[in-house]
């Protein structure tokens, strides 16, 4: 038995985090996927977001908006460095307390930037399939904006009145943040096309060898061998982490 590695937490535990800190870290990590899904708008200055307490006006001449929000860009890189699972971190990482300490800061700052003050959260669009105007029309996804208090269990769409469970909405956002699994070459080309990130084949292979990049085994059929495919979001997370390490060494 030892004490929890989180600063100022002196609870006794057999892991690197106590039970309370594991629960706290798990809650913070649950928001990482949705935050990564929306933070691109803040980076490109296309989302109407601001941190609590930011100036809302005043005198003086209007200033031109910067091409990129550097704070949001750095936050995305930091969020990519956080682990996926709290319990695994508590079991295996002696620096689990430092990770929790950083996660508190990074996730809260990202929440403020993406969602604004914590009196409400925006969970994206409803996307409930609705019938077309004519009987033969294909269903169309509802574009109603889902907004709720952080403690709400459900959120009601203002457009079609569909009630969603917040946990299910968050699960969908996490899946969107990871993307659709693809083979190595396809995922590298996809990220270059969508995010302008260039990933070399040898770097990709090194990340796999080092165990930093997890694969998803594709279906096995009688006509071909199993193929290893990867989530674009996972590859981007590793790229941001490795790129950040290189910058710190310069």
Image (cartoon, rainbow, N blue to C red):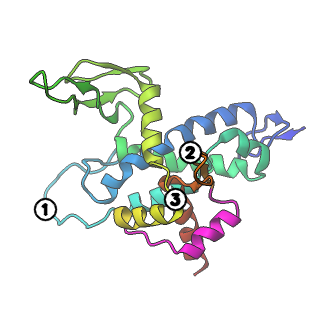
* Label of residue 60 in the image: 1
Residue pictured at 39% horizontal, 34% vertical:
118
Residue 246 sits above or below residue 68 on the image: below
173 or 187: which is nearer to us? 187
Q: Secondary structure at mark 1?
A: loop
Q: Quadrant of residue 219?
A: top right
Q: Secondary structure at mark 3?
A: loop
Residue pictured at 11% horizontal, 64% vertical:
61
Q: Secondary structure at mark 2?
A: helix
The residue where tag 3 is placed is 183
Of badges 2 and 1, the one in the foreground is 2
The residue where tag 2 is placed is 104
Give the Cα separation between the discs numbered 3 and 1: 53 Å
Residue pictured at 29% horizontal, 47% vertical:
49
Give the Cα separation between the discs numbered 2 and 3: 34 Å
Residue pictured at 22% horizontal, 24% vertical:
130
Dot placed on the residue nearer the N-terminal end, 2 or 3 = 2
Magenta region: 196-213
Residue 71 sits above or below residue 85 on the image: below
Residue 140 lies, in percent from the top left, at 21, 31
Residue 8 in sight here: no
Dot placed on the residue nearer the N-terminal end, 3 or 1 = 1
Circle 1 crowding by C-alpha within 10 Å: few under 14, some 14–19, many from 20:
few
């Amino acid at each position: 038995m030892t004490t929890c590695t989180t600063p100022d937490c002196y609870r006794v535990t057999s892991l690197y985090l106590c039970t309370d800190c594991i629960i706290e870290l798990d809650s913070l990590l649950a928001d990482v996927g949705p935050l990564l899904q929306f933070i691109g708008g803040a980076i490109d200055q296309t989302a109407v977001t601001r941190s609590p307490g930011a100036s809302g006006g005043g005198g003086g001449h209007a200033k031109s908006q910067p091409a990129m929000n550097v704070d949001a860009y750095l936050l995305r890189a930091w969020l990519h460095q956080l682990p996926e699972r709290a319990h695994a971190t508590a079991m295996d990482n002696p620096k689990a307390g430092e990770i929790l300490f950083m996660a508190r800061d990074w996730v809260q700052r990202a929440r403020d930037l993406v969602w604004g003050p914590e009196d409400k959260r925006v969970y994206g669009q409803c996307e409930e399939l609705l019938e077309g105007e004519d009987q033969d029309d294909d269903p169309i996804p509802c574009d109603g904006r889902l907004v709720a208090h952080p403690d709400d269990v459900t959120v009601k769409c203002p457009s079609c009145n569909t009630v969603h469970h917040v946990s299910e909405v968050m699960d969908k956002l996490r899946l969107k943040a990871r993307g659709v699994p693809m083979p190595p070459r396809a995922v590298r080309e996809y990220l270059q096309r969508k995010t302008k990130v260039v990933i070399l084949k040898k770097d990709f292979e090194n990340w796999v060898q080092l165990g930093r990049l997890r694969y998803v085994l594709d279906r096995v059929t009688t006509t071909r061998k199993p193929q290893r495919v990867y989530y674009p979001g996972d590859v981007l997370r590793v790229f941001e982490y490795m790129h950040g390490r290189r910058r710190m060494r310069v």
